[in-house]
Image (tube, rainbow, N blue to C red):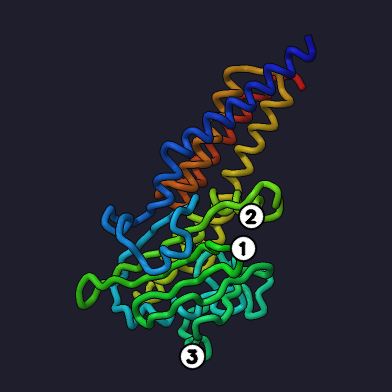
Amino acid sequence: MKNYSFLKQLIAALSLVAVTLLVYLLWARPAQLHWGATAEEINRPMPGDELDPSPTFLATRAITIAGTPEQIWPWLVQMGYGRAGYYGYDILENLGSPTGMASATTILPELQNFEVGDKVPISPVAENVFYAIEPNQYLIWAGQSGQYPGGFTWALYPLDENQTRLVSRIRWSFHSIRQPGVVALEILTEFADHLGVRKILQGIKGRVEGNSEPPYVATIEFAVFMLALLTFLAALILTLIRPFSWGGWLAGLAAGVGWQLIWYAPIPWWGGLLLEMGILWGLYQAFKRTAV
């Protein structure tokens, strides 16, 4: 009987994972891979596409900035770990950076002159190189190994005299499962890359337009993102260790859907926090009377 009970709990937890992944594949993934981009931008060839002609991960995201390419370019070229940062979630992206935790809020002249082949630190343990630099048009970061190393393209497309589209394209292929360290990083990238790139685009826009948000907002957003993920993981653990109930399973499903809404839908941080409070209350109500 005890084994049968655990089997029910295991099936319930696995089904939560399956349904949550299905929602991700059908809704969240397509949305996050094309955040802000038009159909034309998604289908348009871009410099750097040759770095991986048939990638397993291909993301095109974009944002409109009230500025010229000449005004945007200096912010792009100085990005990087240990350089100007990424203008996003500094608490994660700049952790341990020798230039400090905060991303630059001004254009840094000493970081404006780079050449093809120069290295671009991405994190304390990873770096790319400048594959191509076309001032005021595009720059490309590329990997340093393999036949198709993959690339990160940042391109500028003027709309008129005062507005420019900043388009990001990322393309690479996932590695073999025989490289667990790399695979772990790529799983993180699959689900969380969108959060970082979206914030980079918004951070550049705010700096160019002169209305950057206070640094604490990004920190609060990041904390809400982590709360949403941890709540879903806690729901899975509770489903495994507590006797099965439909109320508990539905509360776990709400946690999974809530996690994806907070990560991938345009919900402000305060809306995400309120949603998480409701989900946590629902989990507490669903599981408080079940026996361990």
Identify residue for label 2.
185
User: Quick check: 100 above or below 58?
Assistant: below
The label shown at residue 109 is 3
Residue 224 makes an appearance in the image:
no
The label shown at residue 92 is 1
- Local crowd at mark 2 within 10 Å, few (<14), some, or many (≥20)? few
Q: Residue at x 44, y 58 (%)?
A: 53
Q: Is residue 8 left or right of residue 117?
A: right
Q: Is residue 13 left or right of residue 221?
A: right
Assess whether mark 1 and mark 2 are in contact (beta carbons under 8 angstroms).
no
SS class, disc 2:
helix
Image location (x, y in percent) of residue 170: 46, 60
Q: Residue at x 34, y 56 (%)?
A: 36
Q: Residue at x 28, y 53 (%)?
A: 39
Q: Nearer the viewer, mark 2 or mark 3?
A: 2
Indicate the amino acid at tag 1: Leu
Marks 2/1: CA distance?
14 Å
Q: Nearer the viewer, mark 1 or mark 3?
A: 3
Assess whether mark 3 and mark 1 are in contact (beta carbons under 8 angstroms).
no
Q: Residue at x 70, y 32 (%)?
A: 237
The label shown at residue 123 is none
User: Quick check: 103 above or below 89?
Assistant: below
Q: Quick one: which residue is furthest to the top in this view?
A: 1
User: Quick check: 26 above or below 116?
Assistant: above
Q: Nearer the viewer, mark 2 or mark 1?
A: 2
SS class, disc 3:
helix
Indicate the amino acid at tag 3: Pro
User: Quick check: 14 above or below 143?
Assistant: above
